């Protein structure tokens, strides 16, 4: 038998991949690499946004702690008016029209606080940004630090930073310190500022002018007030020159930072100069005493002068300099567009669009050199991207009411609060529907003049407080609110007059010319015995003799009511002559990369210790 053996044959091996396979593999690899890149990019963007949000939160927390510390060190007693010469300092809280007069949540686009430029709609992220806080503080553990500017000769070939009656000068800076200071918090655009001036600081050299052209010792008293706020010293301007303030001096409003000491009432010639004293009572911030007049509410959003503006000196035109203790450098504002906190935070042509500093004295091309662009750039900036700085005062009589469903409590400042009060004015004991707008409790943090839009029962007299609003009826035993009205007329710093708003009409708001700030001020009693007739205008308006001086302390019954030197005879009164037991401040910021909003709340009580 023949056997045949077959050997196993191996198939021939493939020499390489085909072109299609290679291209497929490359495509898959690129797709996987692209997916990894996208994933890593997304992770990196998320990490970057988280990092920036954390940094924003840290800066917000630092500002919160700084303000909390400041408020905890306030020197004044919150029971106005305070005795003159009591060395208590002051607290002054200015409530701008945003909030009590223009409610951001209820406005139409034409009256909106801020606009979203992309859609043209209301920007609901922006809150109350026109409030200001000014007060004096005392530190018990560590001093406040600042600097003082010493005038010296310019170096060879170096341009001077200023010029005065003794010629050109340069500045040298030295450190000063004090345990007491004057502090101002305010917002301009979307930047929160904290301006601090030391009260009678240590370390100020006796000779503040060390130029060879200077003769004798140049103290604060005879220093040129132009550009003086290169130094961090609280001063007031008098007829003999600059004088450093004490806490007793700062009790009087006219001696505070940015409070002008001269203005005049209408008339030819003007009736008089002087009282009242507040940065925003007039808006004709010229070097000559301006005429008191209403102003558009948008101007309040400039806040106070910045460190850069107040440190400006013009080597060639000193008349453009800002005077310490003098008028504020306010130009005529020309709109550059609507306020957009994200894209156009400084909507005026006269403002630097990046920093918000005044750069021209009027609309048009910049002047050479541009005014108000001083040396101290950003030193008073404490927080950026701010879309809310809302200050509220504790009102123990503020009613908390229920909405029409009886399930939601409404506080002053809530969108439905004023409509609820206006819809049912006599609801304290409404038997038909006991839950409809029922008052459930009392006490809340409120804006000054928060019932402004409920309208008047009648117009106030020239020497009284604003009237009780007609929609607000007190029940028996019900506490009266403290801050519901515009303020005592005798302060001559009243807020927006009562206005009966139609809450169903989003276009119905007080005219811009009547939107005024309300002010809480610890005030001073020195107006009642200073030999100056502060209430002449009010006397003339009420038919009383206009030439009585200090009639509230002269020992006579000037108004003939049978009581000698009663309260009605006083020339002045604080805007709100009631205790301030607490204050609340909300600071809101946005983070532009992640487009997220963060907010913190600071609460400080002023209860007697």
Image (spheres, grey):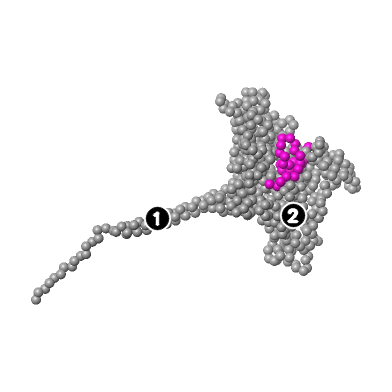
Give the residue pinned by disc 2: 453
Q: Secondary structure at mark 2?
A: loop
Residue 34 pos. (x, y %)? 41, 55
Residue at (34%, 57%) from the top-left corner?
Answer: 23
The disc, 1 or 2, on the residue closer to the chain's N-terminal end is 1
Q: Is residue 594 visible?
A: yes
Q: Is residue 386 visible?
A: no
Q: Residues within 10 Å of mark 1 (few under 14, many from 20)?
A: few
Residue at (65%, 30%) from the top-left corner?
Answer: 317
Q: Is residue 205 above or below residue 556?
A: above
Residue 90 lies in quadrant:
top right
Q: Is the stretch drawn in magenta largely helix, strand or loop? A: loop
Q: Is residue 1 above or below residue 257?
A: below
Q: Which mark is residue 33?
A: 1
Q: Secondary structure at mark 1?
A: helix
Residue at (68%, 58%) from the top-left corner?
Answer: 415
Residue at (66%, 30%) from the top-left corner?
Answer: 318
- Is 40 on the left-hand or right-hand side of 125? left
Tell me where the magenta segment starts and ends, as one range. Answer: 273-298
Q: Residues within 10 Å of mark 2 (few under 14, many from 20)?
A: many
Marks 1 and 2 sit apart, C-alpha to C-alpha, by 63 Å
Q: Is residue 279 magenta?
A: yes
Residue 370 pos. (x, y %)? 62, 35
Residue 507 pos. (x, y %)? 70, 55
Q: Which residue lies most toward the left here?
A: 1
* Front one among 265 and 177: 265
Q: Is residue 230 magenta?
A: no
């Amino acid at each position: 038998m023949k056997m045949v053996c077959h050997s196993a044959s191996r198939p021939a091996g493939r020499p390489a991949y085909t072109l299609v396979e290679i291209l497929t593999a490359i495509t898959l690899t690129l797709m996987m690499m692209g997916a990894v890149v996208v994933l890593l990019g997304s992770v990196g963007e998320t990490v970057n946004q988280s990092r920036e949000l954390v940094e924003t939160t840290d800066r917000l927390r630092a500002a919160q702690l700084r303000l909390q510390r400041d408020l905890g060190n306030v020197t004044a007693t919150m029971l106005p008016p305070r005795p003159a010469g009591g060395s208590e300092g002051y607290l002054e809280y200015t409530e701008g029209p945003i909030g009590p007069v223009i409610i951001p949540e209820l406005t139409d686009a034409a009256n909106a606080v801020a606009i979203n430029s992309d859609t043209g709609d209301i920007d609901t992220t922006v809150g109350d940004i026109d409030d200001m806080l000014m007060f004096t503080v005392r530190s018990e553990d560590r001093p406040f630090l600042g600097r003082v500017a010493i005038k010296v000769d310019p170096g060879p070939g170096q341009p001077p930073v200023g010029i005065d009656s003794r010629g050109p000068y340069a500045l040298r800076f030295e450190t000063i310190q004090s345990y007491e200071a004057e502090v101002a918090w305010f917002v301009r655009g979307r930047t929160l500022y904290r301006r601090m001036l030391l009260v009678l600081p240590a370390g100020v050299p006796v000779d503040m002018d060390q130029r060879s052209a200077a003769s004798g010792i140049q103290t604060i008293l005879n220093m040129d007030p132009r550009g003086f706020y290169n130094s961090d010293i609280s001063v007031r301007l008098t007829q003999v020159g600059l004088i450093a303030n004490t806490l007793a001096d700062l009790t009087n409003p006219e001696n505070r930072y940015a409070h002008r000491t001269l203005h005049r009432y209408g008339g030819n010639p003007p009736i008089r100069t002087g009282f009242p004293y507040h940065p925003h009572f007039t808006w004709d911030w010229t070097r000559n005493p301006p005429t008191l007049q209403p102003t558009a509410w948008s101007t309040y959003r400039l806040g106070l002068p910045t460190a850069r503006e107040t440190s400006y000196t013009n080597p060639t035109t000193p008349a453009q300099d800002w005077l310490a203790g003098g008028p504020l450098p306010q130009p005529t504002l020309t709109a550059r567009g609507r306020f957009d906190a994200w894209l156009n935070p400084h909507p005026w042509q006269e403002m630097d669009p990046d920093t918000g500093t005044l750069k021209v004295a009027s609309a048009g091309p910049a002047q050479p050199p541009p005014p108000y662009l001083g040396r101290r750039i950003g030193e008073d900036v404490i927080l950026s991207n701010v879309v809310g700085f809302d200050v509220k005062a504790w009102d123990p009589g503020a009613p908390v009411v229920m909405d029409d469903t009886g399930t939601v409590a409404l506080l002053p400042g809530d969108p439905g609060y004023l409509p609820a009060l206006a819809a049912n004015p006599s609801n304290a004991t409404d038997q038909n529907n006991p839950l409809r707008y029922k008052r459930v409790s009392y006490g809340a943090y409120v804006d000054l003049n928060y019932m402004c839009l409920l309208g008047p029962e009648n117009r106030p007299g020239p020497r009284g407080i604003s009237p009780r609003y007609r929609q607000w009826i007190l029940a028996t035993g019900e506490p009266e609110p403290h801050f519901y009205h515009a303020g005592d007329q005798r302060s001559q710093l009243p807020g927006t007059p009562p206005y009966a708003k139609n809450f169903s009409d989003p276009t119905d708001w007080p005219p811009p010319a009547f939107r005024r700030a309300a002010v809480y001020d610890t005030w001073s009693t020195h107006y009642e015995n200073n030999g100056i007739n502060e209430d002449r205008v009010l006397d003339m308006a009420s038919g009383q003799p206009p030439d009585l001086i200090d009639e509230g302390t002269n020992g006579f019954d000037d108004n003939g009511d049978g009581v000698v030197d009663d309260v009605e005879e006083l020339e002045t009164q604080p805007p709100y002559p009631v205790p301030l037991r607490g204050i609340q401040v909300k600071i809101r910021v946005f983070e532009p990369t992640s487009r997220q909003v963060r907010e913190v709340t600071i609460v400080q009580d002023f209860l007697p210790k």
